[in-house]
Image (cartoon, grey):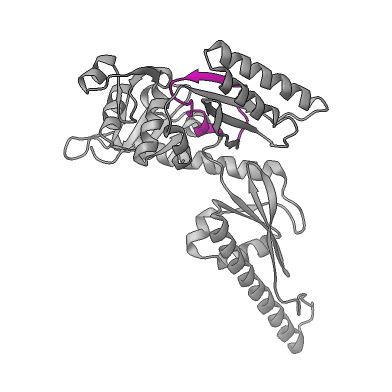
Amino acid sequence: MDLAFLHPLYEHPGPWASVYVDTSRHTENTAHVRHLTAEAMARELAEQGADDATCRAVRSALEDLRHSPEPHGRALFARAGEVVLDPPLARSPRGDLARWAPLPHTAPLLELAGEDPVCVVAYVDRKGADFELRTGLGRKDAGTVTGRTWPMHRTGSADWSERHFQLKVENTWEHNAAEIADALSVCQEETRADLLVLVGDDRERRTVRRRLPERLHDLVVEAPHGTGSRLLEEDVERARTEHVRQRAQRELERFLAAREPGADGRAGAAEGVPALVEAAREHRIDELLLHPDGPDAHRQVWIGEDPDQIAVRRTELTILGEQNSWSARADDALIRSAVATGAAALAVTPATEANGAEGPVGGLGALLRWA
C-alpha cells in the first residue's frame, strides 16, 4: 500500500480522533441508525477526552453519511475541530470504532482500504467487447470496441468458395480479437488496472488473451460465463480476493527469505518491536508488514514530535534529546515513520489466514532498505 495519501495526518500535532464506521447495511431505517451512530461516536470520543470542537466535527461528518450509498464504510481522522482526512473503505470494518490518541489510528486502513484491486471486466464476443471498471466502491462503464461485422459466420460446405469464405471469417475473428486486445491494453494503462477479467466463449477469450501484450498475461483471469452474460459481483470479488491473497503471499515469502542472514551474516528483514523501532529511527524500513491482530501491533512505544523519534522506553527519547514524549501504539507509530520515509505497508492477514502461512513474529515485520 502506498501511504502517501496519509501525509496530511502527520503535518499537524495530535491528539487525533480516529473513527471507522460501517455503511454496508442499507434498510428503511438506515438514516436513523447512522444518526445514532454519529451521536455514539461523538459521545465515545468525548468520554476519552476529545475536545468539543473535534467531537462536533466528527458528528457532523458522520451525519452527512446518513443517505450515503457507500457499500463498505468510511474512516475519519480529525483534530482541533476539523476533519483532515476521510477516505472511503474498500472493505467493511468489523464494527464501528472511535479512538482519541496522540497519533491517528491508521493501522486498520491496511486491511480496510489498502489492497483494493482495480479490475477491468471485458465482455467479449466476435463483434467486439464492452469494458467495465470494477473496484471495491462499485462499477462503471469503461468503453466499447467494435470490430469488423462481415463476414462473421461459418458454413458447413466443403466447396472451395465456401472454404475461402470460412478463411475470411477466421480472418475477421482474428482481426477483431486484435482490436479488442489493443483497446484492452490501452484501458489497462489508463486505469492502471490490477486485473483483467475476460468474459465470453472459450475460443473468443483465448484468442483475445493470446493477442494481449506479454506484460499483461499475468493479470488476466478468464470467467466461465457465456457470451452476453454479466459477471456477478461475487465472481469479481472472488478474483479480487485471490489477487490480494497472492500479493500478500509473495511479499510474505520475500520477508521470510530476507530474514535469514545472507553471506555477510546480516538479514534483510526485521521483526519484533525493538528491531523495528531501531530500523525506523535509521530510516531503513522499505516495506512494513503487519498483522493487525498480532500482539506487537497493540504494544505501546514512546514517540516524540518527529516521525523518527520513536523508542521502546521513554528514557531513550530523553537521551536522544526529545523533551516531549507520548505513549502510542507500535503499529501506528511505525506507520507514521513509514509515511515520513516513503516506505510502503501491507497487511499480511490474507496470506496467513488463507493457508496458515507463517507471519512476522508478534505480527509486525519489515523488509529493509539495507541490513
Relative to 275, 222 lies left or right: right
The structure residue drawn at horizontal position 56% and vertical position 60%, both measured from the top left corner, is: 190
Image x and y of residue 299, in percent:
39, 17
- The residue at the far bottom in this view is 161
Q: Is residue 287 visible?
A: no
The answer to whether 281 is drawn above or below residue 212 in the figure is: above
The answer to whether 15 is drawn above or below residue 26 in the figure is: above
Quarter of image, res 254 = top left
Q: Which residues are magenta?
A: 90-112
Image x and y of residue 86, in percent:
58, 34
Q: Is residue 217 visible?
A: yes
Relative to 82, 200 lies left or right: right
The answer to whether 8 is drawn above or below residue 322 in the figure is: below
Between residues 6 and 192, which one lies in front from this camera angle?
6
What count of labels does the image hold? Answer: 0
Relative to 154, 322 lies left or right: left
Image x and y of residue 12, in percent:
43, 31
Q: Is residue 105 magenta?
A: yes
The structure residue drawn at horizontal position 65% and vertical position 23%, both measured from the top left corner, is: 59
